[in-house]
Amino acid sequence: MKKILTISVAAVATAIALAGCSAGSSGGSMPGMNHGGSGMSSSSVPAASADFNDADTTFAQMMIPHHAQAVAMSDVMLKKDGVPPAVTALATKIKAAQGPEIEEMTSWLQTWAQPTEMPTDMPSAHSMSGMMGEEDMARLGTAQGVEAAKLFLTQMIAHHEGAVMMAKTESTAGKNALAVRLSKDIISSQEAEIQEMKDLLATL
């Protein structure tokens, strides 16, 4: 499984990097779009609309479903009994952080007049960057107690590693200041959580 995930992460990273290289001027000057930010009610929208490229778009389109699955995995854990409190606390933290980020990235894509879903020629959500397949999610759903905690931590470590890879690509290929800043925040927070999860896993 780890080998498959590595290949998927590399494919996603390549897609984002190529998007960045091919979008030198297309992002900030799309016909009919006003990137000045005037009249926008949200404080984050003007900065988000100022400048963007294809790498920013690709990053947001891929990270939205990626985050959504992390929230779904956390929801599954929060409904279980017998889960160690430290794991429950981690699931709560992940959900609290990634839910608002989904909303933020969705608002960027809407401001940029870009689709909020990945184009059909991009990797499917379940084949990219550490995403769990249906069988993985089913196993998590049926597992209980400490077994569920171990499975959640193992799956989320792989999930976070995929997110970090995508974020690192955006941090170098992206153009929009808010998107690049979010990518760096994801790298910092999720690398710390990966270590936290490894430490927790060693105690179970």
Image (cartoon, rainbow, N blue to C red):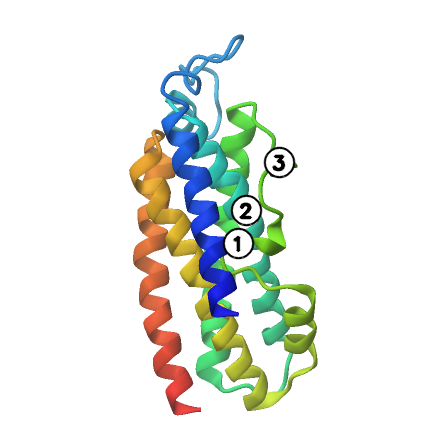
One can see residue 17 in this view: yes
Tell which of 125 and 68 is nearer to you.
Answer: 125
Within 10 Å of the Cα at label 3, are there few (<14), some (14-19), or many (20+) other Cα atoms?
Answer: few
Relative to 59, is 65 on the left or the right? Answer: right
- Residue identified by numbered label 2: 64
Within 10 Å of the Cα at label 1, are there few (<14), some (14-19), or many (20+) other Cα atoms?
Answer: many
Marker disc for residue 121 = 3
Local SS, label 2: helix
Within 10 Å of the Cα at label 2, are there few (<14), some (14-19), or many (20+) other Cα atoms?
Answer: many
- Residue identified by numbered label 1: 67
Picture layout, residue 143 above or below residue 26: below
Picture layout, residue 155 above or below residue 49: below
Look at the image and tell me in which quarter the C terminus lies. bottom left
Picture layout, residue 70 above or below residue 120: below
Of badges 3 and 1, nearer the viewer stands 3
The residue at 50%/87% (across/down) is 84
Tell me, yes or no, whether the two marked residues, 2 and 1, touch with CB atoms within 8 Å. Answer: yes
Q: Amino acid at mark 1?
A: His
Q: Amino acid at mark 3?
A: Asp
Local SS, label 1: helix
The residue at 53%/54% (across/down) is 67
Q: Earlier in the sequence, mark 2 or mark 3?
A: 2
